[in-house]
Image (tube, rainbow, N blue to C red):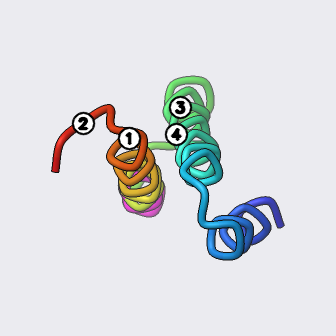
């Protein structure tokens, strides 16, 4: 529910900080998944694909927020 709620908030509010929050949430999900790889030894193709998807889902909102805030150029 958190992913859907943050995504809808980003669309409705259209503020850079909501996109930043969405990107950070996905980024911490990636960190948690990487810790899970080591702790649970669950290194399979499904987990790798999900990690790549979550990493991309973190990258794009964070890049948009950084551009909107003037931290990076286009």
Cα–Cα span, label 3 and label 4: 6 Å
Secondary structure found at label 2: loop
Image position, residue 23 (x, y; %): 53, 47
Image point 63% across, 74% down: which residue?
A: 11
Image position, residue 37 (x, y; %): 51, 34
Secondary structure found at label 1: helix
Cα–Cα span, label 2 and label 3: 24 Å
Circle nearer the viewer, 4 or 2: 2
Image point 65% across, 52% down: which residue?
A: 18
Quarter occupied by the N terminus: bottom right
Q: Which residue is mark 1?
A: 66
Q: Which residue is mark 3?
A: 31
Q: Which residue is mark 2?
A: 72
Q: Which residue is mark 4?
A: 27
Circle nearer the viewer, 2 or 3: 2
Q: Do the residues under discs 3 and 4 have CB atoms within 8 angstroms?
A: yes
């Amino acid at each position: 529910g958190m992913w859907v709620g943050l995504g809808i908030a980003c669309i409705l509010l259209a503020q850079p900080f909501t996109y930043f929050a969405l990107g950070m949430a996905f980024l911490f999900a990636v960190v948690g998944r990487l810790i899970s790889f080591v702790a649970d030894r669950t290194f399979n193709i499904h987990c790798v694909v999900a990690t790549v998807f979550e990493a991309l889902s973190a990258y794009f909102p964070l890049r948009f927020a950084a551009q909107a805030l003037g931290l990076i150029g286009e």
